[in-house]
Protein backbone atom coordinates (compact mmCIF):
# COMPACT_ATOMS: atom_id res chain seq x y z
CA UNK A 1 0.00 0.00 0.00
CA UNK A 2 1.48 3.31 -1.00
CA UNK A 3 1.33 6.43 1.09
CA UNK A 4 1.24 10.13 0.35
CA UNK A 5 3.81 12.65 1.56
CA UNK A 6 3.40 16.41 1.27
CA UNK A 7 6.46 18.66 1.47
CA UNK A 8 5.74 22.35 2.06
CA UNK A 9 8.41 24.64 0.57
CA UNK A 10 8.71 28.01 2.36
CA UNK A 11 11.12 30.90 2.11
CA UNK A 12 13.02 31.10 5.39
CA UNK A 13 15.07 34.22 4.76
CA UNK A 14 15.20 36.28 1.57
CA UNK A 15 17.93 38.54 2.99
CA UNK A 16 20.57 35.80 2.91
CA UNK A 17 22.66 35.29 -0.20
CA UNK A 18 21.49 32.92 -1.54
CA UNK A 19 18.01 32.92 0.01
CA UNK A 20 17.27 29.94 2.28
CA UNK A 21 14.34 27.55 2.17
CA UNK A 22 12.52 25.95 5.06
CA UNK A 23 10.93 22.60 4.31
CA UNK A 24 8.30 20.75 6.32
CA UNK A 25 6.90 17.35 5.45
CA UNK A 26 3.69 15.62 6.42
CA UNK A 27 5.58 12.88 8.27
CA UNK A 28 6.63 15.39 10.94
CA UNK A 29 10.10 16.43 9.80
CA UNK A 30 11.20 19.99 9.16
CA UNK A 31 14.50 21.63 8.36
CA UNK A 32 16.41 23.84 6.04
CA UNK A 33 18.10 22.58 2.89
CA UNK A 34 19.32 19.53 4.82
CA UNK A 35 15.82 18.07 5.21
CA UNK A 36 15.77 14.33 4.67
CA UNK A 37 12.21 13.13 4.06
CA UNK A 38 11.58 9.42 4.53
CA UNK A 39 9.21 7.92 1.96
CA UNK A 40 7.80 4.45 1.46
CA UNK A 41 8.24 2.51 -1.75
CA UNK A 42 5.43 3.47 -4.13
CA UNK A 43 4.64 6.68 -2.21
CA UNK A 44 3.17 9.71 -3.92
CA UNK A 45 5.13 12.86 -3.05
CA UNK A 46 3.75 16.38 -3.53
CA UNK A 47 5.75 19.58 -3.08
CA UNK A 48 3.61 22.62 -2.25
CA UNK A 49 5.07 26.14 -2.44
CA UNK A 50 4.12 28.38 0.50
CA UNK A 51 3.30 31.47 -1.56
CA UNK A 52 2.60 33.53 1.58
CA UNK A 53 6.26 33.11 2.63
CA UNK A 54 7.60 34.88 -0.46
CA UNK A 55 8.12 31.86 -2.72
CA UNK A 56 6.93 32.73 -6.22
CA UNK A 57 7.36 29.31 -7.85
CA UNK A 58 9.22 26.01 -7.54
CA UNK A 59 10.48 23.27 -9.83
CA UNK A 60 11.55 19.82 -8.60
CA UNK A 61 14.46 18.31 -10.54
CA UNK A 62 16.10 14.89 -10.01
CA UNK A 63 19.91 14.96 -9.95
CA UNK A 64 21.21 13.77 -13.32
CA UNK A 65 24.16 11.86 -11.83
CA UNK A 66 22.08 9.71 -9.47
CA UNK A 67 19.95 6.59 -9.88
CA UNK A 68 16.45 7.94 -9.64
CA UNK A 69 14.17 6.80 -6.85
CA UNK A 70 11.33 8.35 -8.83
CA UNK A 71 9.17 6.04 -10.96
CA UNK A 72 7.65 9.15 -12.52
CA UNK A 73 9.64 12.31 -13.07
CA UNK A 74 8.45 15.20 -10.89
CA UNK A 75 5.86 17.20 -12.82
CA UNK A 76 3.96 20.44 -12.36
CA UNK A 77 0.34 19.71 -11.49
CA UNK A 78 -0.71 22.99 -13.11
CA UNK A 79 -1.39 24.77 -9.82
CA UNK A 80 2.24 25.39 -8.81
CA UNK A 81 2.53 22.10 -6.90
CA UNK A 82 4.92 19.40 -8.09
CA UNK A 83 4.24 15.68 -7.75
CA UNK A 84 6.12 12.42 -8.32
CA UNK A 85 5.84 8.75 -7.43
CA UNK A 86 8.59 6.75 -5.73
CA UNK A 87 9.66 3.43 -7.26
CA UNK A 88 8.02 0.20 -6.03
CA UNK A 89 11.34 -1.61 -5.53
CA UNK A 90 14.60 -0.25 -4.13
CA UNK A 91 16.79 0.92 -7.00
CA UNK A 92 20.20 -0.71 -7.43
CA UNK A 93 23.37 0.92 -8.73
CA UNK A 94 26.65 -0.97 -9.14
CA UNK A 95 25.15 -3.90 -7.23
CA UNK A 96 24.22 -1.79 -4.19
CA UNK A 97 20.74 -0.77 -3.09
CA UNK A 98 20.13 2.97 -3.19
CA UNK A 99 18.66 4.10 0.13
CA UNK A 100 18.57 7.87 -0.40
CA UNK A 101 18.98 10.48 -3.06
CA UNK A 102 19.47 14.23 -3.30
CA UNK A 103 17.24 16.23 -5.60
CA UNK A 104 17.00 19.92 -6.46
CA UNK A 105 14.34 22.49 -5.71
CA UNK A 106 14.75 25.36 -8.15
CA UNK A 107 12.82 28.38 -6.93
CA UNK A 108 12.02 32.02 -7.54
CA UNK A 109 11.16 34.52 -4.82
CA UNK A 110 8.90 37.57 -4.93
CA UNK A 111 10.56 40.67 -6.36
CA UNK A 112 13.58 38.82 -7.79
CA UNK A 113 14.06 37.43 -11.30
CA UNK A 114 17.02 35.21 -10.33
CA UNK A 115 16.53 31.45 -10.01
CA UNK A 116 17.87 29.85 -6.82
CA UNK A 117 18.44 26.21 -5.94
CA UNK A 118 18.38 24.02 -2.83
CA UNK A 119 19.27 20.32 -2.56
CA UNK A 120 17.34 18.31 0.05
CA UNK A 121 17.12 14.50 0.19
CA UNK A 122 14.57 11.70 -0.03
CA UNK A 123 15.25 8.40 1.78
CA UNK A 124 13.41 5.14 1.31
CA UNK A 125 11.93 3.75 4.53
CA UNK A 126 13.01 0.20 5.19
Image: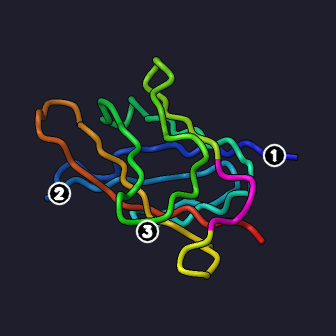
Extreme residue toward the front, this view: 94
Residue 62's disc number: none
Disc 2: which residue:
18
Vertical order, 40 against 91 (above or below): above
The C terminus: image quadrant: bottom right
Q: Quick check: marks 1 and 2 in contact, CB under 8 Å? A: no
Magenta region: which residues? 86-91
Residue 2's disc number: 1
Vertical order, 80 against 106 (above or below): above
Image coordinates for residue 73, horizontal then vertical, percent: 50, 41
Image coordinates for residue 76, horizontal then vertical, percent: 45, 27
Q: Residues within 10 Å of mark 2 (few under 14, many from 20)?
A: few
Image coordinates for residue 8, horizontal then vertical, percent: 52, 43
Q: Earlier in the sequence, mark 1 or mark 2?
A: 1
In three-dimensional space, the C-alpha distance between marks 1 and 2, rounded to whole angstroms, equals 36 Å
Disc 3: which residue:
34
> Considering depth in this image, is 122 or 25 the residue closer to the camera?
122
* Identity of the residue drawn at 61% across and 46% down: 71
Quarter-of-image position of residue 80? top left
In three-dimensional space, the C-alpha distance between marks 1 and 3, rounded to whole angstroms, equals 25 Å
Say what secondary structure mark 1 lies in: loop
Amino acid sequence: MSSAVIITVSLQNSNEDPPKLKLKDSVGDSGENNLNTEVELGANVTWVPDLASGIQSIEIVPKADQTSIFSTEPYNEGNGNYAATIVNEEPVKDGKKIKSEDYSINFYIDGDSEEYCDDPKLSIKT
